[in-house]
Image (spheres, rainbow, N blue to C red):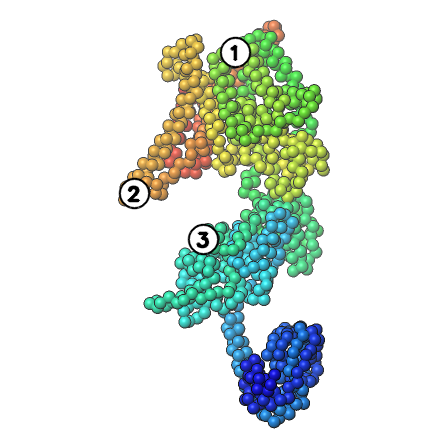
Amino acid sequence: MTSPETVTWLQERTTLGILSPEVLNAIAQVIEEQVVPAETDLVSEGTPSEALYILVEGQLESNSTNETNPALACGFLPGAVIELKELLLDELTPFTITTVTECHLWVVPAAKFRELATQYPEIAQAFSRQLAQELAQVTSALGYEQERTVALRPYLVTKAQRGIIGTSRYAVRLREQIREAAADRKSVDIFGEPGLEKDNIAALIHFGSPKRRQPIIKVNCGILQTSGADLFGRAGGKPGLLEWLGEGTLVLNNIQELPEELLPPVTQLLKTGTYTPVARSGEPAPEPHPSKARILIVSEKTQPTIERSVGHVIKVPPLRVRKTDVQAQVEYYTSLYIRARGVPKPHITPEALRRLQSYDFPGNLKELKNLVERAIVQAEGANELTEEIFWPAETKKKRFRVNLLNAYPRLRQFLRSPWWPDRINYGFTATAFAIIVAVLFIGPQTRDRNFVLNFFWAWWWPFFLFLFPFLGRIWCSVCPFMIYGEITQKLSLWLWPRKLKRWPRQEAEKWGGWFMFGLFSLIFLWEELWHLENTAYLSACLLLLITAGAMIFSALFERRFWCRYLCPIGGMNGLFAKLSMTELRAQQGICSASCTTYQCYKGGPQKGEGMETNGCPLYSHPAQLEDNRDCVLCMTCLKACPHRSVEFNLRPPGIELWTTHVPRSYEVALLYLLLGGIYLHRLPELQSWLGLQLDLTQFWQHFGLSLLVLIIPAIFTFAAYKLIQMSYWLANYIEAAKSKIQNPKSKIQNWMKPRSFVELAYGYLPLVLGGNLAHYLRLGLGEGGRILPVTFATLGLSGEQLPILVAHPAVIAFLQGATIIFSVLMTMLLTQKIAKQPVRSLLWQHLAAIALGVSMWAIIVF
């Protein structure tokens, strides 16, 4: 390259272009060309400068041992002038420069360059001016950074508090989502319940990203100006946080509190990456400004508009579904606290851990942290954190519950023993049932001479109707029908080894209840038309019919398919069991956190204190039970559980009916069938009360009246529901007319839309149970006490001198009336609880309950 070309190149490609052509020509005259191989040290740190280097081709990079100034480590491209400042100021080289590739350099030896600098003072002057310009730029940049720091300081997030603790699948998935979000610059919506430390997840995303050295700020949306000036800045005025932030991260906390006026500009920011500064009144809107900031959204629930605009959506799981992580969280919070206070680390007992795992933690991680810290303080240096210290850990679901197994350890011991129910069933009930059926067939055929008939109608029915509010479906645990079903199942498998059919659950859930309803309807009609109450062999046929159903389906399907879906007596028991003041449940937290075998559900060998069982006969998991309908209190789950998760609780009667209950139409049909059955049992009294003159000895007249009696109560209550609906629409119409609003569905202050008929129908359940009990009280108190002479009569002996215990008719009438009155009141209370509406909105249903109660009084008490 000739000297003029060299001068031109220096002017156009290097910082020496500020010098005059004369000086550049002098420099060009002394330049020496040099080619340096790759991976060669051109200059070494801490040594005197040997020459001025001008990079023509290739690439260089510098490295320094000075860790406090990372700016010394940089790269050089063609046109770079190296060692100029060091030669002019006579300083040592501050870094080592190494060739990355083979480099073509122009070299001016140090002695020659110093001669040129002495000969041409312009070189030093030009360099001084350049240093002054660079200093001014640095000062300006420093001033900007100071202003930026002052503007961002109130919102800065300095670090992430912790990572995601735990090994559950929810924790693993959350860590994966955080890593995915940190890998790019897309906006993120992080939502979940309060107390989940979602802002910490936002910090984890930022500090795990390539832009971790940029600032991250958190802004509470509830305090933003409605104009958005603090976020977007003012046109031609004060910059907003987005401008100060640059390439940093903006965390918009509690986006649900964002002023409505700011939703469109925030959505624009998320979608386009641009924002518009706020203009003064009367001024034209400025052009949108691009933003390089990353936006992280934190909210307590998903926002549809926001969710459609972001790149990642992270739903943070609540602690109640991460029960396996509770122990790790407790250990972590305990370690944090003891390190901060310098106290010994206490050990948490298994009972205390189970109690924490059974709690749902509405406050999530924050509540757990506070609970652990408070427990350590209350322990006062003790070596253990026991169950009693965590006294606030009670779930809403467990509120008003008392675990009778803890209160009465002997009850737990009995229910886990072989006596309940196996020895009772196979040692007594199976044999007694065979004898009962035989006596019904071969003994006297009337109730006053057959003790089995007397026992069945005068003892069994009133006793178990009375027992439903206390022990629910307890009869099903000792039911002879299913005992013979299980015997058939075991015998058939022994004679014909095979795999029993799995339950057709979908079909059974859809049609099983209606089969049950139909079978119960036929039993009612059979009972009334053929006088089963006073015909022994027909009562035996009824028992054998139900037993045959249990045996047939037990031979076909595994476990107790008949009991779960088809048994009419089981359906009635399950319906009335909803009113029970006791329940068998399991602690969901312990089951989800500690159980891996599900032995209570599937069965399995002995494990710990859990016994060997075949699993729940009804395929119900005690932690997932919605009500008492699908629990026969066989206590298989109590025996199988190795974690003491199963509880037998005392509770408010029928609490699920107004909390977590799921209504079913076939249950409502059965409820109304049982309601009609009360009147069917009192057909002569009903006919007399209504003044009817039908001849009940005529089959078809008897049959037609029986059908009407079964149907009319349901029609009556449905008419009351229609009146409730009409009252609602009429009230809406009147309110709309007053307000001159044409929308008939507009909300009004005092009237609420009624719940569905299927939901409200369960309100009649206490009246149905009470009416049936009142009917059978006459048999129980009037004939049950004659069991001894009736027994002797059954055996062909005279029992006239034997004692009897019979209540006075006035006492029976009083108890029947009191039962009906109490049932009506409970029906009205339960209806209010289910509907959660003012009394006036449910007036017609209350009047219907009272009318039914009056009619029952007329045909039962009088």
Q: Amino acid at mark 1?
A: Asn
Q: Earlier in the sequence, mark 1 or mark 2?
A: 1
Gap between marks 1 and 2 measured at Cα: 63 Å
Q: Is there any visible trace of residue 158 in the rendered image? A: no
Kindly identify which numbered label has been placed on residue 305.
3
Residue at left offset 56%, top offset 52%: 196
Q: Which residue does the numbered mark 2 point to in the structure image?
A: 742
Residue ranking furthest to the bottom: 119
Image label count? 3
The x and y percentages for residue 92 are 68, 83
Q: Residues within 10 Å of mark 3 (few under 14, many from 20)?
A: few
Q: Relative to 739, is 353 on the left or the right?
A: right
Gap between marks 3 and 1 measured at Cα: 71 Å
Q: Amino acid at mark 2?
A: Gln
- Residue nearer the viewer, 201 or 849: 201
Where the N terminus falls, by quadrant?
A: bottom right
Q: In the picture shown, does residue 219 fall above or below 797? A: below
Which image quadrant is residue 841 in?
top left
Question: Which mark is nearer the camera, 2 or 3?
Answer: 3
Question: Could you tell me which secondary element the residue under label 1 belongs to?
Answer: helix
Question: Which mark is nearer the camera, 3 or 1?
Answer: 3
- Residue nearer the viewer, 351 or 165: 165
Kindly identify which numbered label has been placed on residue 534.
1
- Residue nearer the viewer, 499 or 397: 499
